Each structure stands twice: as structure tokens, then as C-alpha cells.
Image (spheres, rainbow, N blue to C red):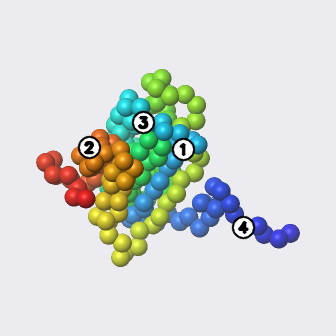
Amino acid sequence: MPAFPATGRSALRRGRVSRPEQVYLVTATTRHRQPTFMDHARARLASQLIHARGTWGDAGLLAWVLMPDHWHGLLELGEEPLDRVVARFKAAVARELHASRLFEGKLWDRSFHDHALRREESLLGVARYIVGNPIRAGLAHSALGYPYWNAVWLDEDEPLPL
């Protein structure tokens, strides 16, 4: 029987390797790309969970943005595989939104996209790309005008330069 190329979620999983200390750009989309996080209460609760250290296990979250229909994160893995880290994040957000009665039904698409950063790629450049998403989408004129993002490079008084 001829082998058919993988499509959809199986294509995303094929070749996925989790390496400790590797930095990944991760994108998770809401179910059917619904603008679930246009709602302030949902976005605020999700952001609190994104900030919670327990959400990430031994991985480090370097930068992130929550958009109306997706989330981008820059993650540095520990020993736990990437798929488990992302699954825990998605489950935590869905569980809390359901428990708070802010959302019903399936929140996230089943899979996610990831890109392992190469040595020559700039962490700060990728972080700027991530937090610049709301500006490119027309949701804000500057990073300071959009509340649902963060990066480890921030001082308390100084935002990530764009």
C-alpha cells in the first residue's frame, strides 16, 4: 500500500522533537479561529494563567501575546516534552474559563504549531515579532496599548522596544 503524505494535525506532529533547553516559538489557535479572547474577562483570566509559573512546569516562558483567536509564546524547554507543556497550558486555560462560566465548549484547536529557533535567530527579534502582533492586527498603536502580553526582558518601567 503506498504511503500518503501526512496532513493536518499528523503533519504538524511528524518530525516534532522536544529538546531540553531548546527555545520554541509556539502558536495555539482557538477552535475554528473564533475570537474568543476579544472578551476582556476571558482574556484577563487566560493572561493570569499564562503568568502563573505552575502552568509551564520546568519550561520557561520568555515572551507571549494573547490575540483574540490565538496565542503565541516563546518557550524554553526544561526536561518535559513540548507537547505536554502546551497541552497543560491549553487545558489550564480551558478548565478555568469553564469553571468561571466565561466559556462553554471546546476552546482550542487540537494541535499547535511550533518552530525551534536556530542559533542564528535572535530571541529578542522573535520576542518583538510576538508582542508586535496586536499592532500589526490593528488592535493597538503600540505594545503599551495592548494589555495581553509580556516578556522576560521587561524592566518594571520600560517596555520591550519595538
Residue 129 on image: x %, y %: 35, 60
**Is 14 rendered above or below residue 148?**
below
Q: Which of marks 3 and 1 is nearer the N terminus?
A: 1
Amino acid type, mark 2: Gly
* Residue position for label 1: 33
Instruction: Label 1, secondary structure: give it.
Output: helix
State the image coordinates of residue 64 (x, y, percent, origin top left). 36, 51
Judged left or right of residue 121, residue 110 is: right
**Label whose residue precedes the other's in the sequence (3 or 2):** 3
Q: What's the residue at 62%, 64% (across, down)?
A: 14
Mark 4: amino acid: Pro
Disc 4 element: loop
First-in-chain label (2 vs 4) = 4
Say which quadrant the C terminus sits in.
bottom left
Residue under label 3:
38
Q: Give me the residue at 37% from left, 54% from top.
A: 136
- Which of discs 4 and 1 lies nearer the camera? The answer is 1
Q: Mark 2 points at which residue?
A: 145
- Tell me the residue that label 4 is attached to: 5
Q: Quadrant of residue 5?
A: bottom right
Percent position (x, y) of residue 107? Answer: 54, 37
